[in-house]
Image (cartoon, helix red, strand yellow):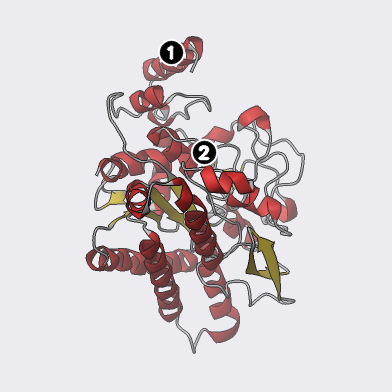
Amino acid sequence: MRSWTRSFLMFSIFLDLLSGSHGDVFRVPPLDVTQKDLLQLLELGDDIKFDVPALYVFGDSTVDSGNNNFLPSISKANFPPFGIDFADGKPTGRFSNGRTEADFIAQVVGLPFPPPCLGLSKEEHKTLRTGVNYGSSACGILPDTGKFFVSNIIKHVHYMNKNYEVLINNSCGTCLSFDNQIDLFETTVKNLQPSFDGPESMANYLSKSLFFISIGSADVSMGYDILDNITKQKTPFPNFAQAISQKFSSKIQKLYDLGARKYLVNNIGMMGCSPVTLNSKIPMTATCDDEINKHAQIHNKLLSDLLQKLQSELSGSKFIKADVYKVFSDIFASPNSYGMTDTRDACCVAAEHGTRPCIRDLAPCNNRNEHVYFDPFHASESTNFILAKRCLKESSICTPISLVDLLRA
Protein backbone atom coordinates (compact mmCIF):
# COMPACT_ATOMS: atom_id res chain seq x y z
CA MET A 1 0.00 0.00 0.00
CA ARG A 2 1.33 3.46 -0.87
CA SER A 3 2.69 5.42 2.08
CA TRP A 4 0.11 8.22 1.84
CA THR A 5 -2.73 5.69 1.97
CA ARG A 6 -1.25 4.09 5.06
CA SER A 7 -0.71 7.47 6.70
CA PHE A 8 -4.29 8.50 5.96
CA LEU A 9 -5.59 5.25 7.47
CA MET A 10 -3.60 5.69 10.67
CA PHE A 11 -4.48 9.41 10.91
CA SER A 12 -8.21 8.75 10.52
CA ILE A 13 -8.09 6.12 13.25
CA PHE A 14 -6.25 8.61 15.49
CA LEU A 15 -9.01 11.18 14.91
CA ASP A 16 -11.63 8.60 15.85
CA LEU A 17 -9.81 7.84 19.07
CA LEU A 18 -9.46 11.55 19.83
CA SER A 19 -13.15 12.18 19.25
CA GLY A 20 -14.22 9.18 21.30
CA SER A 21 -15.75 7.26 18.39
CA HIS A 22 -16.87 3.81 19.53
CA GLY A 23 -16.55 2.14 16.12
CA ASP A 24 -12.92 2.95 15.36
CA VAL A 25 -11.66 -0.53 16.24
CA PHE A 26 -13.91 -1.92 13.49
CA ARG A 27 -13.10 0.64 10.81
CA VAL A 28 -12.98 -1.13 7.47
CA PRO A 29 -9.44 -1.08 6.02
CA PRO A 30 -8.99 0.12 2.43
CA LEU A 31 -9.24 -2.45 -0.34
CA ASP A 32 -5.53 -2.19 -1.18
CA VAL A 33 -4.32 -2.60 2.40
CA THR A 34 -1.11 -4.59 2.68
CA GLN A 35 -0.96 -7.69 4.85
CA LYS A 36 1.54 -5.95 7.16
CA ASP A 37 -0.70 -2.93 7.71
CA LEU A 38 -3.77 -5.09 8.17
CA LEU A 39 -2.04 -7.18 10.83
CA GLN A 40 -1.07 -3.97 12.64
CA LEU A 41 -4.61 -2.62 12.38
CA LEU A 42 -5.93 -5.86 13.88
CA GLU A 43 -3.26 -5.66 16.59
CA LEU A 44 -1.93 -9.08 15.61
CA GLY A 45 1.65 -7.87 15.15
CA ASP A 46 3.34 -7.54 11.76
CA ASP A 47 5.82 -10.33 12.57
CA ILE A 48 3.18 -13.06 12.79
CA LYS A 49 3.61 -15.83 10.22
CA PHE A 50 0.96 -18.02 8.59
CA ASP A 51 1.86 -21.18 6.70
CA VAL A 52 -1.40 -21.32 4.73
CA PRO A 53 -0.86 -21.93 1.01
CA ALA A 54 -4.51 -21.73 -0.03
CA LEU A 55 -8.03 -20.75 0.99
CA TYR A 56 -10.90 -22.88 -0.33
CA VAL A 57 -14.38 -21.43 0.18
CA PHE A 58 -17.72 -23.28 0.12
CA GLY A 59 -21.16 -21.92 0.84
CA ASP A 60 -24.09 -19.79 -0.21
CA SER A 61 -24.63 -16.10 -0.99
CA THR A 62 -22.73 -15.06 2.15
CA VAL A 63 -19.51 -16.03 0.36
CA ASP A 64 -20.44 -16.28 -3.35
CA SER A 65 -17.85 -14.22 -5.24
CA GLY A 66 -19.41 -14.59 -8.67
CA ASN A 67 -20.15 -18.24 -9.45
CA ASN A 68 -23.82 -17.50 -10.05
CA ASN A 69 -22.77 -15.03 -12.74
CA PHE A 70 -21.94 -18.07 -14.87
CA LEU A 71 -25.21 -19.90 -14.21
CA PRO A 72 -28.76 -19.34 -15.51
CA SER A 73 -29.83 -18.01 -12.13
CA ILE A 74 -31.88 -15.01 -11.08
CA SER A 75 -30.05 -14.94 -7.75
CA LYS A 76 -27.14 -12.78 -8.84
CA ALA A 77 -25.29 -9.71 -7.62
CA ASN A 78 -23.69 -8.76 -10.94
CA PHE A 79 -25.24 -5.31 -11.19
CA PRO A 80 -24.92 -1.99 -9.33
CA PRO A 81 -25.18 -1.08 -6.52
CA PHE A 82 -23.50 -4.37 -5.48
CA GLY A 83 -19.74 -3.93 -5.35
CA ILE A 84 -19.85 -0.15 -5.03
CA ASP A 85 -16.95 -0.29 -2.54
CA PHE A 86 -15.03 -3.03 -4.36
CA ALA A 87 -12.39 -2.52 -7.06
CA ASP A 88 -13.40 0.38 -9.33
CA GLY A 89 -16.87 0.26 -7.79
CA LYS A 90 -17.91 -2.55 -10.09
CA PRO A 91 -20.11 -5.52 -9.15
CA THR A 92 -18.35 -8.88 -9.04
CA GLY A 93 -21.12 -11.19 -7.90
CA ARG A 94 -20.56 -10.58 -4.17
CA PHE A 95 -23.82 -9.90 -2.32
CA SER A 96 -22.48 -6.85 -0.51
CA ASN A 97 -21.16 -3.37 -1.11
CA GLY A 98 -17.58 -4.65 -0.76
CA ARG A 99 -15.61 -7.55 0.62
CA THR A 100 -16.98 -10.70 2.21
CA GLU A 101 -15.72 -12.39 5.35
CA ALA A 102 -13.71 -14.78 3.15
CA ASP A 103 -12.01 -11.85 1.42
CA PHE A 104 -10.83 -10.36 4.71
CA ILE A 105 -9.48 -13.73 5.84
CA ALA A 106 -7.54 -14.02 2.58
CA GLN A 107 -6.01 -10.57 3.10
CA VAL A 108 -4.94 -11.42 6.64
CA VAL A 109 -3.25 -14.62 5.51
CA GLY A 110 -1.59 -12.84 2.59
CA LEU A 111 -3.47 -14.62 -0.19
CA PRO A 112 -5.34 -13.17 -3.18
CA PHE A 113 -9.13 -13.24 -3.06
CA PRO A 114 -10.18 -16.81 -4.00
CA PRO A 115 -11.69 -16.48 -7.50
CA PRO A 116 -15.04 -18.05 -8.42
CA CYS A 117 -14.54 -21.58 -9.66
CA LEU A 118 -16.80 -21.20 -12.67
CA GLY A 119 -14.85 -18.17 -13.86
CA LEU A 120 -11.49 -19.95 -14.11
CA SER A 121 -9.89 -21.00 -17.36
CA LYS A 122 -8.78 -24.60 -17.92
CA GLU A 123 -5.18 -23.53 -17.49
CA GLU A 124 -5.93 -21.80 -14.18
CA HIS A 125 -7.59 -24.98 -12.92
CA LYS A 126 -4.30 -26.80 -13.47
CA THR A 127 -1.99 -24.20 -11.93
CA LEU A 128 -3.83 -22.03 -9.37
CA ARG A 129 -2.55 -23.02 -5.92
CA THR A 130 -3.82 -20.15 -3.75
CA GLY A 131 -7.42 -21.31 -3.45
CA VAL A 132 -10.80 -21.24 -5.15
CA ASN A 133 -14.30 -20.05 -4.19
CA TYR A 134 -17.14 -22.51 -4.89
CA GLY A 135 -19.88 -20.55 -3.09
CA SER A 136 -23.22 -20.26 -4.87
CA SER A 137 -26.19 -18.14 -3.87
CA ALA A 138 -29.57 -19.66 -2.93
CA CYS A 139 -28.61 -23.32 -2.56
CA GLY A 140 -27.80 -25.25 0.57
CA ILE A 141 -26.55 -28.39 2.27
CA LEU A 142 -29.51 -30.52 1.28
CA PRO A 143 -29.65 -31.22 -2.47
CA ASP A 144 -33.45 -30.88 -2.22
CA THR A 145 -33.34 -27.39 -0.75
CA GLY A 146 -35.24 -25.96 -3.70
CA LYS A 147 -37.63 -28.76 -4.51
CA PHE A 148 -40.48 -27.34 -2.48
CA PHE A 149 -40.74 -24.46 -4.91
CA VAL A 150 -42.98 -25.09 -7.90
CA SER A 151 -41.83 -25.72 -11.47
CA ASN A 152 -38.63 -27.53 -10.53
CA ILE A 153 -36.53 -29.09 -13.24
CA ILE A 154 -33.04 -30.57 -13.27
CA LYS A 155 -30.38 -29.12 -15.56
CA HIS A 156 -27.11 -30.76 -16.51
CA VAL A 157 -24.18 -28.35 -16.76
CA HIS A 158 -21.11 -29.56 -18.68
CA TYR A 159 -18.05 -28.15 -16.98
CA MET A 160 -14.40 -29.21 -17.09
CA ASN A 161 -15.26 -32.37 -19.04
CA LYS A 162 -17.79 -33.47 -16.45
CA ASN A 163 -21.56 -33.20 -16.15
CA TYR A 164 -23.02 -31.66 -13.00
CA GLU A 165 -26.67 -32.05 -12.10
CA VAL A 166 -27.92 -28.76 -10.68
CA LEU A 167 -31.33 -27.82 -9.41
CA ILE A 168 -33.47 -25.22 -11.14
CA ASN A 169 -36.52 -23.77 -9.43
CA ASN A 170 -38.65 -20.71 -9.93
CA SER A 171 -37.09 -19.02 -6.94
CA CYS A 172 -33.37 -19.01 -7.58
CA GLY A 173 -32.83 -20.67 -10.92
CA THR A 174 -29.65 -22.72 -11.16
CA CYS A 175 -27.19 -22.90 -8.28
CA LEU A 176 -24.42 -25.11 -7.00
CA SER A 177 -25.55 -27.22 -4.07
CA PHE A 178 -23.03 -28.27 -1.43
CA ASP A 179 -22.80 -31.61 -3.26
CA ASN A 180 -21.94 -29.78 -6.50
CA GLN A 181 -19.32 -27.68 -4.75
CA ILE A 182 -17.55 -30.68 -3.23
CA ASP A 183 -17.59 -32.42 -6.61
CA LEU A 184 -16.00 -29.35 -8.20
CA PHE A 185 -13.30 -29.32 -5.52
CA GLU A 186 -12.57 -32.97 -6.26
CA THR A 187 -12.06 -31.95 -9.89
CA THR A 188 -9.74 -29.17 -8.73
CA VAL A 189 -7.63 -31.64 -6.76
CA LYS A 190 -7.32 -33.95 -9.77
CA ASN A 191 -6.36 -31.06 -12.04
CA LEU A 192 -3.70 -29.78 -9.61
CA GLN A 193 -2.17 -33.17 -8.83
CA PRO A 194 0.24 -33.22 -11.82
CA SER A 195 1.72 -29.87 -10.73
CA PHE A 196 2.99 -31.40 -7.47
CA ASP A 197 6.03 -33.63 -7.04
CA GLY A 198 3.91 -36.48 -5.76
CA PRO A 199 0.99 -37.54 -3.54
CA GLU A 200 2.83 -36.59 -0.34
CA SER A 201 3.55 -33.08 -1.60
CA MET A 202 -0.11 -32.62 -2.56
CA ALA A 203 -1.28 -34.01 0.78
CA ASN A 204 0.99 -31.61 2.69
CA TYR A 205 -0.37 -28.67 0.68
CA LEU A 206 -3.99 -29.60 1.37
CA SER A 207 -3.36 -30.27 5.07
CA LYS A 208 -2.04 -26.72 5.51
CA SER A 209 -4.78 -25.05 3.45
CA LEU A 210 -7.85 -23.51 5.10
CA PHE A 211 -11.32 -24.75 4.19
CA PHE A 212 -13.96 -22.14 4.96
CA ILE A 213 -17.63 -23.16 4.89
CA SER A 214 -20.57 -20.77 5.26
CA ILE A 215 -23.86 -22.43 4.38
CA GLY A 216 -27.20 -23.46 5.85
CA SER A 217 -29.45 -20.41 5.84
CA ALA A 218 -31.40 -21.55 2.78
CA ASP A 219 -31.93 -25.00 4.32
CA VAL A 220 -33.25 -23.55 7.58
CA SER A 221 -35.44 -21.06 5.72
CA MET A 222 -36.91 -23.86 3.61
CA GLY A 223 -37.54 -25.95 6.73
CA TYR A 224 -39.33 -23.05 8.38
CA ASP A 225 -41.61 -22.52 5.37
CA ILE A 226 -42.37 -26.24 5.07
CA LEU A 227 -43.28 -26.56 8.72
CA ASP A 228 -45.56 -23.55 8.63
CA ASN A 229 -47.37 -24.53 5.47
CA ILE A 230 -47.34 -28.30 5.19
CA THR A 231 -45.99 -30.67 7.82
CA LYS A 232 -45.51 -28.83 11.08
CA GLN A 233 -47.24 -31.53 13.14
CA LYS A 234 -45.63 -34.46 11.34
CA THR A 235 -42.04 -33.23 11.04
CA PRO A 236 -40.82 -31.13 13.98
CA PHE A 237 -38.05 -28.76 13.01
CA PRO A 238 -35.39 -30.52 15.15
CA ASN A 239 -35.88 -33.63 12.99
CA PHE A 240 -35.50 -31.58 9.83
CA ALA A 241 -32.38 -29.90 11.23
CA GLN A 242 -30.96 -33.33 12.07
CA ALA A 243 -31.25 -34.29 8.39
CA ILE A 244 -29.24 -31.17 7.48
CA SER A 245 -26.59 -32.14 10.03
CA GLN A 246 -26.29 -35.70 8.74
CA LYS A 247 -25.89 -34.57 5.15
CA PHE A 248 -23.30 -31.99 6.17
CA SER A 249 -21.34 -34.74 7.99
CA SER A 250 -21.14 -36.89 4.86
CA LYS A 251 -19.81 -34.00 2.76
CA ILE A 252 -17.18 -33.10 5.36
CA GLN A 253 -16.07 -36.73 5.31
CA LYS A 254 -15.55 -36.46 1.56
CA LEU A 255 -13.53 -33.26 1.97
CA TYR A 256 -11.42 -35.01 4.59
CA ASP A 257 -10.85 -37.99 2.30
CA LEU A 258 -9.66 -35.58 -0.39
CA GLY A 259 -7.08 -34.14 2.02
CA ALA A 260 -8.72 -31.26 3.90
CA ARG A 261 -7.64 -30.92 7.54
CA LYS A 262 -8.22 -27.33 8.71
CA TYR A 263 -11.85 -26.19 8.75
CA LEU A 264 -13.55 -22.91 9.64
CA VAL A 265 -17.33 -23.37 9.69
CA ASN A 266 -19.81 -20.53 10.15
CA ASN A 267 -23.07 -21.12 11.95
CA ILE A 268 -26.03 -19.07 10.74
CA GLY A 269 -26.94 -15.62 11.99
CA MET A 270 -30.09 -14.09 13.42
CA MET A 271 -32.31 -14.69 10.39
CA GLY A 272 -35.31 -13.48 12.34
CA CYS A 273 -33.82 -9.98 12.57
CA SER A 274 -32.94 -9.42 8.91
CA PRO A 275 -34.65 -6.60 7.00
CA VAL A 276 -36.45 -9.08 4.74
CA THR A 277 -38.00 -10.76 7.79
CA LEU A 278 -38.98 -7.51 9.48
CA ASN A 279 -40.39 -6.03 6.27
CA SER A 280 -42.40 -9.18 5.54
CA LYS A 281 -44.47 -8.70 8.67
CA ILE A 282 -47.84 -7.00 8.45
CA PRO A 283 -47.64 -4.38 9.74
CA MET A 284 -43.87 -3.97 9.36
CA THR A 285 -42.08 -4.00 12.69
CA ALA A 286 -38.71 -3.54 14.35
CA THR A 287 -39.25 -6.67 16.44
CA CYS A 288 -37.30 -9.78 15.48
CA ASP A 289 -39.11 -13.01 14.65
CA ASP A 290 -38.30 -15.22 17.64
CA GLU A 291 -39.56 -18.39 15.95
CA ILE A 292 -37.15 -18.06 13.03
CA ASN A 293 -34.28 -17.27 15.40
CA LYS A 294 -35.20 -20.32 17.47
CA HIS A 295 -34.88 -22.53 14.40
CA ALA A 296 -31.51 -20.97 13.65
CA GLN A 297 -30.37 -21.77 17.19
CA ILE A 298 -31.51 -25.39 16.87
CA HIS A 299 -29.49 -25.73 13.69
CA ASN A 300 -26.47 -24.05 15.30
CA LYS A 301 -26.52 -26.36 18.33
CA LEU A 302 -26.58 -29.45 16.10
CA LEU A 303 -23.74 -28.00 14.04
CA SER A 304 -21.66 -27.34 17.14
CA ASP A 305 -22.19 -30.90 18.38
CA LEU A 306 -21.36 -32.30 14.95
CA LEU A 307 -18.08 -30.39 14.65
CA GLN A 308 -16.96 -31.70 18.04
CA LYS A 309 -17.82 -35.22 16.91
CA LEU A 310 -15.94 -34.84 13.63
CA GLN A 311 -12.92 -33.44 15.46
CA SER A 312 -12.73 -36.60 17.59
CA GLU A 313 -13.32 -39.02 14.69
CA LEU A 314 -11.22 -37.57 11.85
CA SER A 315 -7.58 -38.02 12.78
CA GLY A 316 -5.43 -34.91 12.32
CA SER A 317 -8.38 -32.64 11.65
CA LYS A 318 -8.95 -29.26 13.26
CA PHE A 319 -12.42 -27.71 13.31
CA ILE A 320 -13.43 -24.32 14.58
CA LYS A 321 -16.95 -22.94 14.62
CA ALA A 322 -17.54 -19.26 13.93
CA ASP A 323 -20.47 -18.03 16.01
CA VAL A 324 -22.06 -15.66 13.50
CA TYR A 325 -25.28 -15.69 15.53
CA LYS A 326 -23.51 -14.25 18.58
CA VAL A 327 -21.73 -11.56 16.58
CA PHE A 328 -25.03 -10.33 15.17
CA SER A 329 -26.60 -10.52 18.62
CA ASP A 330 -23.77 -8.40 20.06
CA ILE A 331 -24.11 -5.82 17.28
CA PHE A 332 -27.88 -5.55 17.78
CA ALA A 333 -27.41 -5.20 21.55
CA SER A 334 -24.86 -2.38 21.27
CA PRO A 335 -24.66 -1.01 17.70
CA ASN A 336 -22.72 2.13 18.63
CA SER A 337 -19.87 0.00 19.96
CA TYR A 338 -19.41 -1.32 16.44
CA GLY A 339 -19.88 1.98 14.62
CA MET A 340 -23.38 1.05 13.45
CA THR A 341 -26.26 3.50 13.27
CA ASP A 342 -28.83 1.33 11.45
CA THR A 343 -29.59 -2.26 12.39
CA ARG A 344 -33.08 -2.28 10.88
CA ASP A 345 -32.93 -1.28 7.23
CA ALA A 346 -30.97 -2.32 4.17
CA CYS A 347 -28.65 0.27 2.68
CA CYS A 348 -29.68 -0.34 -0.91
CA VAL A 349 -33.14 0.49 -2.26
CA ALA A 350 -34.98 -2.84 -2.34
CA ALA A 351 -38.14 -3.77 -4.20
CA GLU A 352 -41.53 -4.61 -2.69
CA HIS A 353 -41.10 -2.68 0.55
CA GLY A 354 -37.68 -4.12 1.28
CA THR A 355 -38.52 -7.80 0.81
CA ARG A 356 -36.68 -8.33 -2.48
CA PRO A 357 -33.11 -7.75 -3.74
CA CYS A 358 -31.61 -4.34 -4.50
CA ILE A 359 -33.12 -2.47 -7.43
CA ARG A 360 -30.64 -2.35 -10.28
CA ASP A 361 -28.62 0.86 -10.75
CA LEU A 362 -30.26 2.80 -7.90
CA ALA A 363 -27.71 4.47 -5.64
CA PRO A 364 -27.49 3.02 -2.10
CA CYS A 365 -27.22 5.01 1.12
CA ASN A 366 -24.11 7.11 1.70
CA ASN A 367 -23.42 5.76 5.19
CA ARG A 368 -23.38 2.11 4.11
CA ASN A 369 -20.57 1.17 6.49
CA GLU A 370 -22.87 2.17 9.36
CA HIS A 371 -25.52 -0.31 8.21
CA VAL A 372 -25.52 -3.89 9.47
CA TYR A 373 -27.16 -4.99 6.21
CA PHE A 374 -26.40 -3.86 2.67
CA ASP A 375 -29.44 -5.54 1.12
CA PRO A 376 -32.47 -7.10 2.87
CA PHE A 377 -30.66 -10.45 3.15
CA HIS A 378 -26.93 -9.83 3.34
CA ALA A 379 -24.40 -8.11 5.55
CA SER A 380 -22.56 -4.92 4.68
CA GLU A 381 -18.80 -4.90 4.22
CA SER A 382 -18.49 -3.44 7.73
CA THR A 383 -20.37 -6.36 9.25
CA ASN A 384 -18.26 -8.82 7.28
CA PHE A 385 -15.13 -7.16 8.65
CA ILE A 386 -16.48 -7.40 12.19
CA LEU A 387 -17.16 -11.10 11.68
CA ALA A 388 -13.65 -11.71 10.37
CA LYS A 389 -11.91 -9.63 13.03
CA ARG A 390 -13.71 -11.18 15.99
CA CYS A 391 -13.19 -14.69 14.63
CA LEU A 392 -9.50 -14.05 14.11
CA LYS A 393 -8.93 -12.78 17.63
CA GLU A 394 -11.57 -14.19 19.97
CA SER A 395 -11.86 -17.81 21.06
CA SER A 396 -15.34 -16.99 22.38
CA ILE A 397 -16.47 -16.34 18.79
CA CYS A 398 -14.39 -18.88 16.93
CA THR A 399 -14.27 -21.93 19.17
CA PRO A 400 -12.54 -23.86 20.60
CA ILE A 401 -9.61 -21.71 19.40
CA SER A 402 -9.42 -18.42 17.53
CA LEU A 403 -8.86 -18.42 13.79
CA VAL A 404 -5.37 -16.99 14.27
CA ASP A 405 -4.47 -19.98 16.45
CA LEU A 406 -5.86 -22.36 13.82
CA LEU A 407 -3.92 -20.65 11.05
CA ARG A 408 -0.70 -20.92 13.05
CA ALA A 409 -1.28 -24.55 14.05
| Looking at the image, residue 181 lies above or below residue 15 | below
Q: Left or right: where does residue 141 sit relative to residue 306?
A: right
Give the residue displayed 63% in from the left and 52% down from the top: 118
- Give the amino acid at mark 1: Phe
Q: Position of residue 43 (x, y in %)?
A: 30, 27
**Mark 1, residues whose alpha carbon is within 10 Å: few (<14), some, or many (≥20)?**
few
Whether residue 370 is visible, yes or no, is yes
Q: Position of residue 230 (x, y in %)?
A: 59, 84
Residue 254 found in image quarter: bottom left
In the image, residue 207 above or below residue 179: above
Q: Could you tell which of marks 1 and 2 lies nearer the N-terminus?
A: 1
Above or below, 259 relative to 169: above
State the residue in front, 103 or 378: 103
Residue 331 image point, x, y percent? 42, 44
| Residue 37 sits in quarter | top left
Q: On residue 113, which mark appears? A: 2
**Disc 1 to disc 2, C-alpha distance:** 27 Å
> Which residue is painted at 47% across and 55% down in the image?
189
